Image: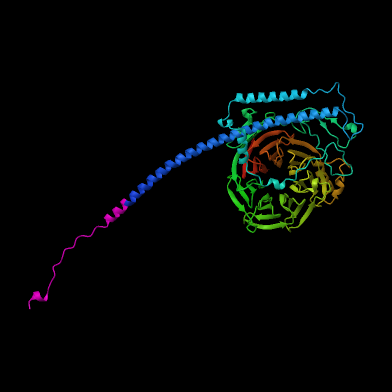
Amino acid sequence: MTSNGVYNHRTIQSVGRPVPPTTRITDALDTIKQEFEIVQADRDALRVQRDDFEAQMNSQINEIHGIRRSLYDLEVQQGKVRQQYEDELRRLRAEVATLRQTSGPPAGIPGFQPPTLSGPPRLGPAPSSLADSFSRDRDDRTKEKARGPMSPKTDMDWELRQKTREKDRVPDVREPKRLKPDTTPPDPSAAHDSDTSGTLPPPHALYSAAAGPSTVRNQGRSPADYQVTLPPINTNSQATFPEDLSLTSVPPEYRKEGSDWFAVFNPRVKRSLDISLVHNLSHASVVCCVQFSTDGKYLATGCNRTAQIYDVKTGAKICVLADDSAGKTGDLYIRSVRFSPDGKLLATGAEDRQIRIWDISKKRIRNIFDGHQQEIYSLDFSRDGRFIISGSGDKTARIWDMNDGSSKVLTINDQDSLNGDAGVTSVAISPNGQLVAAGSLDTIVRIWDVSTGALLERLRGHRDSVYSVSFTPDGQGLVSGSLDKTLKYWDVSALTASMAVKGKKENAKEMSPKRPGDKPSPSPCTMDFLGHKDYVLSVSVSHDGQWVVSGSKDRCVQFWDARNATLQFMLQGHKNSVISLDVNPAGGMLATGSGDSLARIWRYSSI
């Protein structure tokens, strides 16, 4: 056997070299690079589209702002014309009433002697004055044309503008729930029954806008005193409101405009304030209430189902308080919010008749005060934090003890309440903690003793429901705002002094007249604030006592000099009613809440 037969070796075949792995990586990187370039191209295209959209959006925003300014200007002009016609109608009606009086004595007043005239009555002045009014309107239109067009949008159809503006106004779902049924005020010329306190006397010294003599009707006097002539208006008790105050009727230095707001300063007085918008706080519903904390660093707002707390400096929302146990169906508007004096608690009053006391740091409810039979409209803390006052549509105010939750009920059970409707719309506790004031739907402001719960006084003078009350910082005055479109300042210094002298244990009934004619009211109304065109819904007094601020359904906020009721400026910064406002205790800031679902923080300063 040969060796070849034993060992049959195979020839070794050569094998090719494997593909290096770097080739695959290179291909993958090329693919990634191509995809990246595609994405980068898409990004560049999107950037171009974004820039185009931003340019279009900015153009449309500028156009909207121009339309808004035009609408504001048109609205101001329309209000001016409407006011002129209303004034002319009032004057003509007064002339007609005068002519009727000269034709014979009024029925039911025997022996009445009408004022004698030097000659027969002349019927000429009425149409002549009406022609003068038309002439004035024509002159006003000529002046407006001389100013030049304010915007091309001002030429659109007037009715279409009105419909658009009304559609733009967010419906205020809160107000109708607080409004009382419309009632016709009692005839001021009717005889008053001295044995009852129910008949409302006419408001004191309601002068006409002109600084001339006016008349006040019979207030239970003898027939010979049926009309008495009053002296010219006293500017210390009631200042003349500039009826022609509008954005176009004042010099440039007396007006200021923002993107969607403007302020008009009274040219008849020295301008001493400036105003600017600081923060715009959007909400999901109507903003029913606003209030600053005692240190001025935070702002609480109330809307549908939630109370919210904002940082005043930054405008950031730092807390949302909502009761998850409340029903999920229907609305549950928070009508009032109040910080405790130490800033640790927030009280909320709502439509479900409950007062919730929130621990802010824990965002949890600490207490629930239950007892009211109708929705709660207003809350106020005492300065020491021991009590919280609540006002409700059930005709009661309650003083709640924060320690044990007990309450003292202050009930309005007057038999002479207007239509029996005396729901409490607003409450305020005096700075010394001794008095509680409450505004009511029956037009009366009532003051109670906190310690005894006794009714001390009824302040009469408003012609319609009182929606807001606020004590002055020194406790010597009380400001009230009403649906009669006015504010009133009540001097309660005598009542405050009497409380200090007699002490809390004194029987408060001895201090209060049992009937209007028993003795003069110790708290007279000394000033009227006239100028709002619609319901006054909220009032506040600055903490230095210099300014009274009011918010109205006419969408305006007005700053008044607290010393003489003179208007400093008018601010229009909302599209709907200014339901609530509050002046910052630290000074220099104002918060407003509106039916347009916005709360706004404004800064005002002396100049």
Q: Residue at x 71, y 30 (%)?
A: 85
Q: Nearer the viewer, residue 62 or 505?
A: 62
Range of the magenta residues? 1-30
Name the quarter where the N terminus is drawn. Answer: bottom left
Q: Residue at x 57, y 36 (%)?
A: 259
The answer to whether 361 is drawn above or below residue 556 in the figure is: below
Residue sticking out furthest to the left: 2
Return the residue nearer the eye: 520 or 339: 520
Asked whether the viewer can see residue 539, the reply is: no
Q: Position of residue 26 (x, y in %)?
A: 29, 53
Image position of 589 (left or right of 211):
left
Quadrant of the drawing holding the C terminus: top right
Q: Is residue 48 left or right of residue 212?
A: left
- Image location of residue 501, percent across then percent down: 84, 46
For residue 419: magenta? no
Residue lying at 79% horizontally and 37% vertically, measured from the top left: 526
